[in-house]
Image (cartoon, grey):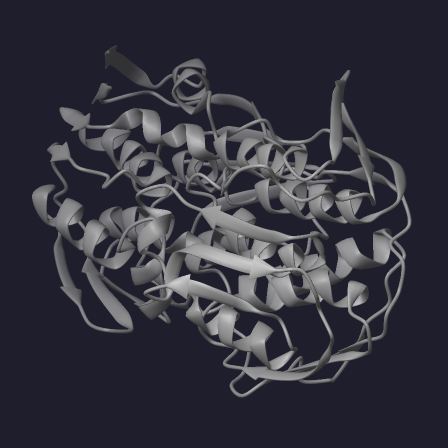
Amino acid sequence: MRVSISKSNISGEVIAPASKSYTIRGLMGAALAKGESILTSPLLAEDTMAARNVLSAIGVAIKPKRNAWQVSGGRFHAPEKELYCGDSAATLRIMIAISALVPGTTCLTAGPTLGKRPVQTLINALRQLGVTCEASDGRALVTVAAGLPGGVTELPGDISSQYVSALLLAAPGAARPVTIRLSTPPASQPYILMTLDCLKAFGITVAVSDDFREYQVTPQLYRPANYVIEGDWSSVSYFLALGALSGPVTVSNLNPESRQGDKVLLDYLREMGADVTVDNSTVTVRKSTLTAIRADLTDCIDLLPTLAVLAAVADGVSELRGIARARIKESNRAAAMSEGLGRMGIAVTEEEDRMLITGGGARGAEIDPRQDHRIAMAFSVLATVTGKTVVNDAECVAKTYPDYWEVLQKTGGEVSKDE
């Protein structure tokens, strides 16, 4: 699907969709808890459906209720076929670890994009805990045999926080205590904190060092829980950015005390000169003249596309650091943003771990989002200012925000679709 975007007068209210990350973590916690759990306000999108499907295939019953899912967990059976994780990295990586608690041998596969992303570091970490597992060429296809003896494992913390989250979620089911040590400081630490919050909600305690580089987990039983999913700061970052470019835009259903790392966007917007108001669970951003920013994205790497398009209209040269891990996301996001911004007339200097973006003079262009939902949504923000922009493969937003284009239209976005 191609989407054409013209210059738009943006204003209105948006309800933040549920957090993808908390929905998947909640599903995994509920699946591991013997009994019935309720997940309230879950996200219904391609990534979360991938998690639901693989859990159903190992015996977890998930029943939709009004604005909730009833999850009956704690009793896994050997899968009858390969578990297809789609392009959901969180689903694949967490399930690699949890598969050690599933009878028999589990085989996990992934979609074309996710299949290119590495998992060997997680495989190595599980092997240190006595798990029999292997990955084809260090990527999906992955096979995991039942059995999680436990012990001590060490891995780098700066590749993906999902590796740490996967180990933490599986560790309570080990035969003996598990110690997870990180040889480097953790990147995207907020996502590890989100996992720890989820574990606590399902009755699991974890001893954590002050520097978040060592985690000790004793064998424990998950307990069923009523788990409420908060709004997603990552998904609404585009509407908060829209507010700064041509608002006002008001976004509700947000937790101002959230563990989500992308909440830091509010600080970045203010630093760039945006008019931001927070009132309980509601954030309003008004049209403002923006100035360049220097930002370290180590703990909020998903904000790279959003901040890059904001930098494209800001006065001066912005420096975005800590971006190396953006190259192993759904696409090489650093390269995708450099290419797209270049097409729109923006000067970009791309280095291994930083980008320099000179704001001003953006124009419309045809954008290839590389099948990456965040690239497509980010360029739609800039397109409302430049007009005359086409985003190809626009259906990729369904990964996390299926009705994104409709919500953009409701806030004044001049959007037309060519199926």
Residue 51, given in percent of the width and then of the height, sits at 59, 39
Residue under the point 55% across and 25% down: 14
Is 244 or 107 nearer to us in this picture?
107
Give above or below for 1 relative to 220.
above
Give the quarter of the figure containing the N terminus.
Answer: top left
Q: In this view, does 188 lie to the left or right of 86?
A: right
Q: In which quarter of the image is residue 125?
A: bottom right
Residue 70 appears in the rendering: yes
Q: Height in image: 194 above or below 134? A: above
Whole-percent x and y of residue 366? Answer: 11, 32
Residue shown at 44% from the left, 38% from the top: 86
- Most foreground residue, 46 or 93: 93
Please identify the quarter of the rendering in which residue 276 is found: top right
Q: In this view, does 41 lie to the left or right of 1?
A: right
Counting the numbered discs, the total is 0
Identify which residue, 354 or 26, lies in the foreground: 26
Give percent across and percent down for residue 224. 89, 43
- Say which residue appears at 71% left-offset and 60% top-offset: 169
Q: Quadrant of the C terminus?
A: top left
Q: Where is residue 33 in the image (x, y as percent from the top left)?
A: 85, 47
Of residues 395 and 268, the one nearer the viewer is 395
Q: Quadrant of residue 181?
A: bottom right
Depicted 286 relative to depicted 178: above or below: above
| Image height of 144 relative to 230, above or below | below
Position of residue 278 in the picture relative to residue 63 (left or right): left
Residue name at image x 55 percent, y 61 percent = 162
Residue 290 seen from this side: no
Left or right, 354 with reference to 93:
left
